[in-house]
Amino acid sequence: MLKRTLTLVSLTITLGTLLLALGCSGSNTNPVAPVSSDQPLVSRQENQPPSAPQLGFITTLWGDNYVLACSIDPEGNPVQYRLTLSNGQVFDQTQGAQNWVINLLNPTPVSSYSSGQWAWCKLPKLPIGSYTATVQAIDPNPTGSGKWGGESSLNFSIRK
């Protein structure tokens, strides 16, 4: 039991280090209202789609596979993701959240993520082989751009 706990703590620390090293943050560089009340407000640009996501892939000690994605929305709005595997499987968060979870240690399904928050998509059991995951993000807010952002791709292999 102690060995399993230590392994889980080690995995958590390693995972945290990986996410910090990847460096996805939720900074918002949009113009804001001026401090002085005698200056006119700075107008915002048209709502832009989220950035192409940074991606990661993790296989747990228990054999579960996750694709991780992190995208920044220029306006700081929440984001949703669509993941397409090279075998044709699609995991579209706008159509349901069953595979999209908070994180490895909290597998609660989530319907959207904060801008800059890592998204976790738990993959079903896949046959041994090589795959490509292609991911895009969208701002689901009614006032959002309504456009999918740029896509990113990641190659990974299932070994056993």
Image (cartoon, rainbow, N blue to C red):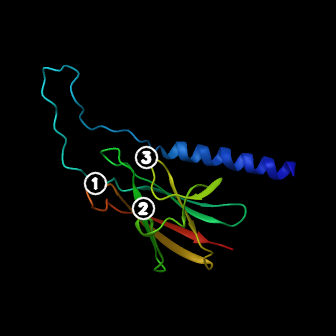
Identity of the amino acid at label 2?
Answer: Tyr
Q: Position of residue 109 (x, y in %)?
A: 55, 60
Q: Give neighbour class at mark 1: few <14, some 14-19, many 20+ (Cα, 10 Å).
A: some
The structure residue drawn at horizontal position 58% and vertical position 70%, both measured from the top left corner, is 157
Pointers 2 and 3 in contact (CB under 8 A)? no
Q: Nearer the viewer, mark 1 or mark 2?
A: 1
Q: Which residue is mark 1?
A: 144
Name the one closer to the observer, 146 or 15. 146
Q: With respect to residue 141, does 133 lie above or below?
A: below
Which mark is first along the chain, 2 or 1? 2
Name the one closer to the observer, 98 or 157. 98
Q: Residue furthest right?
A: 1
From the viewer's perspective, tell me whether residue 65 is left or right of residue 139: right
Q: With respect to residue 142, does 20 lie above or below?
A: above
Q: Position of residue 103 (x, y in %)?
A: 59, 54
Pointers 1 and 3 in contact (CB under 8 A)? no
Identity of the amino acid at label 3?
Answer: Gly
Q: Which residue is mark 3?
A: 116
Q: Position of residue 135 (x, y in %)?
A: 42, 64
Mark carried by residue 81: 2
The C terminus lies in quadrant: bottom right
Which mark is first along the chain, 3 or 1? 3
The structure residue drawn at horizontal position 87% and vertical position 52%, both measured from the top left corner, is 1
From the viewer's perspective, tell me whether residue 85 is left or right of residue 57: left
Measured Cα–Cα span from mark 2 to mark 3: 12 Å
The structure residue drawn at horizontal position 77% and vertical position 50%, both measured from the top left corner, is 7
Q: Position of residue 93 (x, y in %)?
A: 44, 65
> Circle 1 sits in a helix, a strand or a loop, which is it?
loop
Identity of the amino acid at label 1?
Answer: Gly
Measured Cα–Cα span from mark 1 to mark 2: 14 Å
The structure residue drawn at horizontal position 59% and vertical position 57%, both measured from the top left corner, is 108
> Circle 3 sits in a helix, a strand or a loop, which is it?
loop
